[in-house]
Amino acid sequence: MKKSPKADNDLLYESLLQLQSVEECRRFLQDLCTVSELKAMEQRIEVAMYLREGMIYQDILKRTGASSATISRVNRCLQYGAEGYQAILPRMDAFWEEEKKKKL
C-alpha cells in the first residue's frame, strides 16, 4: 500500500468522519463544494464503479456523460492511486446494485 504524506491539516477529513447520515453528508458537501465540484465527484465515483465492473470506456461515456479524460483519470487512480477507491468501492456494492436498478 502506498503511503500518503501526512496532511498539514486534517480538519476536512476529520469533519467527514463526523457525519452520521447520507442527508447530513449531502448538506455538508453542498455547503462546502460548488455544484460543479459535486457533480464531478458524483460522476467520478459512478465511473469508478463501472470500471470496476469491467465496462469499456465508450459504454461508460454513454451512461455517465464523463469525458474520456475523466474516465482515464479515474482508471489511473484505480490502478496506481492512493487506494482510496479500493477501500470504498467494495463497501458500496449493495448500494450500487440498487442504484443501477433505479436507472433501468
Image (cartoon, rainbow, N blue to C red):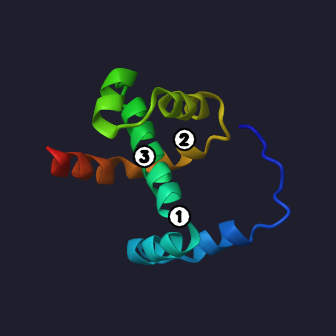
Q: Quadrant of the C terminus?
A: top left
Q: How many labels were placed on the picture?
A: 3
Dot placed on the residue nearer the N-terminal end, 1 or 2? 1
Mark closer to the chain start, 3 or 1: 1
Q: How far across and down, in percent of the image, does residue 98 sit?
A: 23, 52
Do the residues under discs 1 and 2 have CB atoms within 8 angstroms? Answer: no
Tag 3: Cα neighbours inside 10 Å, few (<14), some, or many (≥20)? some
Q: CA distance from mark 1 to mark 2?
A: 26 Å
Which residue is under mark 1?
34
Q: Nearer the viewer, mark 1 or mark 2?
A: 1
The local crowd at label 1, few if under 14, some if 14 to 19, many if 20 or more residues have their Cα within 10 Å, is: few
Position of residue 64 in the picture relative to residue 25 (left or right): left
Say which amino acid is labelled 2. Gln
- Which residue occupies 56% across, 66% down? 33
Secondary structure beneath label 3: helix
> For residue 43, which numbered disc appears in the image?
3
- The residue lying at 50 percent from left, 51 percent from top is 41
Residue 22, position in %: x, y?
40, 71
Residue 52's image quarter?
top left
Give above or below for 61 relative to 99. above
User: In 3D space, how far apart are the residues under numbered discs 3 and 1 (Cα atoms)?
Assistant: 14 Å
Residue shown at 45% from the left, 78% from the top: 24
Tell me which corner region of the image, top left, top right, bottom left or bottom right, holds residue 85: top right
Position above or below: 101 against 81 = below
